[in-house]
Image: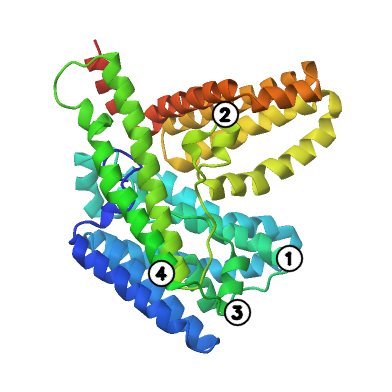
Amino acid sequence: MGRMRCTRTFEVAMIISAEWIAGIYVAFALAVLGLRKGPVGAVRDGLFAAINLGAVFIVHFAARDPRAILVFWVYLAAVVGMYPAMRILAARPVYFWLAFALPILLMAGVRYTPTAWVAQELRGLQEVLRRNPDFSLAPYFLGISYLAFRCSRMLIDVRNGAPWPTFVQFLGFAFFFPVMSVGPIHRWTEHREALENKTTFPVSPCLQRIGIGLAKAVFLAGWVGQLDYSQMFFDGHLHSLVDLGIAAVAYYLYLYLNFSGYCDVAIGLAGLAGVSVPENFRNPLMARNLKEFWNCWHITLSEWMRDLVFSPLAKKLVTRVGPKYANHAIAGIILLVFMLIGVWHGKGWTFFIYGLLHGLGVVANYYYTLALKKYLSREEYLSYMANRWIEAVGILMTFCYVAGTLFFMANSPTQIYQILHVLR
């Protein structure tokens, strides 16, 4: 999915020139700005969907290779077919959760369908698979995880009283160009309200946000990325543990600048379209523990997991086990949620380990907080939390832990072996 594994989120489309892609972004901005002046209705919804589908196709599919163009039509057909299936299933309460699961099942099918089986059906993949055993169809289905989470959350909004989108509204929401490849995961209720009420945002702040995002993602991330794992360790020389530490910090900063930068671009572009999408980062580098980190990093993913996985499971399990074991039940659910977050990020045991390590870290913080509240008075606890030295130590420990665990998300098993092999 990028230079390492899940970075360089937009660079998969860089087969064509950056100037051409910039032109598409400008054209998209002008088109949606023009639509903001038109009357609300079916025609506007259709044009909005067409503009978003066209931008997604040109930037992320037509700019790649012929296989990607074919995948786009398969992708579109799958999402088009998903809409009536979701409506039919959701109409009967007994099948509601199956309707909710449909987008996630599509995502899982794309990610985890054995490539060897697909290759038997598509002869062109056989040679690709021979040359690259780790080949996956998932990168061709750009933004499938974000699309799946948006569409599943849409079912919850509909159940809670929001009207069903029309077919063209659904396409415009599912393939909303600004958030297609990197999020944030915005909600149907916010999307619909913005379009129906013709929400407008000042153009200048939106352009400023885009400029800041590009500066972070292209210039600063590119500069910091010169010291990450891919640049540091695959040069045929031996390296020290100091180099490993430098690469870990550089990759963490690179990932933050790249990811948050393109989210800034997405938020700015969405603002030009009159759609408010939520913030996805809130200074995570200064988090004092892992729980706080996940409240500041990829915020919309954390909220999706909290609202749709953690809270329902915690409510049911705590009720079943009773107050005596409630804390242990909550800790177990935390661990499960972070294992899901790990496999959501990518396929393979390294992503599972990444999620597991973060789950263990959040569970440790959970029990530590319970112990503090048990053995300290309220005043002592508040004093402890306000202590600047304790805060500084917490920030440093969290930064180092996050940077260290990203080793498993940054590198494939083969790359991990190569890095460990050249450490002296």
Residue closer to the observer: 145 or 424? 424
Q: Residues within 10 Å of mark 2 (few under 14, many from 20)?
A: many
Nearest to the eye among marks 1 and 3: give it: 3
> What is the distance, in whole Å, between disc 1 and disc 4 at their CAs?
46 Å
> What is the distance, in whole Å, between disc 1 and disc 3 at their CAs?
31 Å
Tag 3: amino acid: Asn
Q: Residues within 10 Å of mark 4 (few under 14, many from 20)?
A: few
- Residue labelled with disc 1: 92
Q: How is the image coloured?
A: rainbow
Residue in view at x 39 percent, y 47 percent:
259
> What is the distance, in whole Å, between disc 2 and disc 4 at their CAs?
36 Å
Q: If you read the primary sequence from the N terminus, does the residue marked by circle 2 or circle 3 appear first?
A: 3
Residue closer to the observer: 276 or 306? 276
Nearest to the eye among marks 4 and 3: give it: 4
Residue 289 got which mark?
2
Tag 4: amino acid: Ser
Nearest to the eye among marks 2 and 4: give it: 4
Q: Is residue 71 above or below residue 198?
A: above
Q: If you read the primary sequence from the N terminus, does the residue marked by circle 2 or circle 4 appear first?
A: 4
- Residue labelled with disc 3: 197
Question: Image check: 297 left or right of 94?
Answer: left
Would you say the residues marked 2 and 4 are in contact, meaning their CB atoms lie under 8 Å apart? no
Tag 1: amino acid: Arg
Q: If you read the primary sequence from the N terminus, does the residue marked by circle 1 or circle 4 appear first?
A: 1
Element type where label 3 sits in the image:
loop
Tag 2: amino acid: Asn
Nearest to the eye among marks 1 and 4: give it: 4
Q: Is residue 65 above or below residue 344?
A: below
Nearest to the eye among marks 1 and 2: give it: 2
